[in-house]
Image: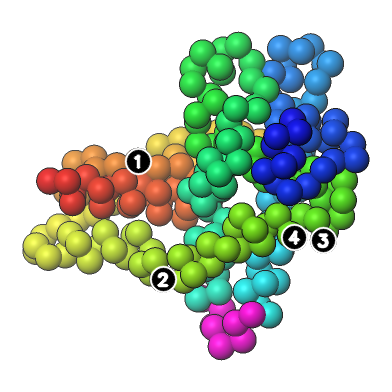
Amino acid sequence: MKTLEEKLGYTFQDRALLENALTHSSCANESRGRLQSNERLEFLGDSILGMVVADHLYRSHPELPEGELTRVRAALVCEESLVQVAQELGLGDYLRLGKGEEIGGGRHRPSIRADAVEAVLAAVYLDGGIGSARKIIQTFILSREIAGRTQPRDYKTSLQELVQRESGQVLQYCLTGEEGPDHDKRFFVQVLLNGRSLGSGSGHSKKEAEQMAAKAAIQVLKAE
């Protein structure tokens, strides 16, 4: 844990908060009540992250309209961005998983690692206040702002432009499933081109899942 604290640049007064942030529900379930999962911390961390990023963008870019602010924020707080943070921290190595989840590759599952990042942010907030959480968000997430502003408008638009090079192309986004409690829903979407499956994606909202599916589809088409 000390190594992770060094990577974060933050030392916990109450290390139990950090341990809780790294405890997946599969581990908590197997503990028969001895451990609490990180789901509540994840819920709090998601809100903290969204608020800090929105506040930064609002104050730093008075020239940007609401739509552009929304797009940049989405790029910064999406699952893909959080997974990159988890990779920088080596967070997967510290996760506490149940035996089944461990065997199933949960330590490398993007959704689990992204959720853990949000839980860690909440743990830092509860332990050291909003200033400490903001510092970590600035270091690991807001530093990506330039990339967030310069990436394509969105993957769905890029995919649409790509397939429209030929006439008669029909794109469809199909919701294939959802899981999790209401405060932490995860949606799964598949994108079809003329009825052919091109890719799938998941996210905390249908829009995010569609974006991830479109990204996967773009990679398939470019490979072809």
Instruction: Please state if 169 lies on the left or on the right of 201 as rendered.
Output: left
How far is mark 3 from mark 2, CA to CA? Answer: 28 Å
Q: Nearer the viewer, mark 1 or mark 4?
A: 4
Name the secondary structure under disc 2: helix
Q: From the viewer's perspective, is residue 218 above or below residue 95?
A: below
Q: Quadrant of residue 35?
A: top right
Q: Residues within 10 Å of mark 1 (few under 14, many from 20)?
A: many
Of the image marks 1 and 3, the number of the one nearer the N terminus? 3
For label 2, the residue is 150
How far is mark 1 from mark 4, CA to CA? Answer: 33 Å
For label 3, the residue is 131
How far is mark 3 from mark 4, CA to CA? Answer: 5 Å
The single residue placed furthest to the left in the displayed view is 167
Give me the disc on residue 134: 4
The residue shown at (36%, 67%) is 152
Q: Main secondary structure of the magenta part?
A: loop
Image spot of residue 49 (x, y percent): 68, 56
Q: Residues within 10 Å of mark 3 (few under 14, many from 20)?
A: few
Magenta stretch in the rendered image: 60-67
Instruction: Please state if 12 lies on the left or on the right of 99 as rendered.
Output: right
Residue type, mark 4 in image: Arg
Q: Are marks 3 and 4 in contact (CB under 8 Å)?
A: yes
- The answer, for residue 173, to whether it is visible in the render is no
Of the image marks 1 and 2, the number of the one nearer the N terminus? 2
Name the secondary structure under disc 3: helix
Residue type, mark 3 in image: Gly
- The answer, for residue 14, to whether it is visible in the render is yes
For label 1, the residue is 200
Nearer to the camera, 139 or 183: 139
Of the image marks 1 and 4, the number of the one nearer the N terminus? 4
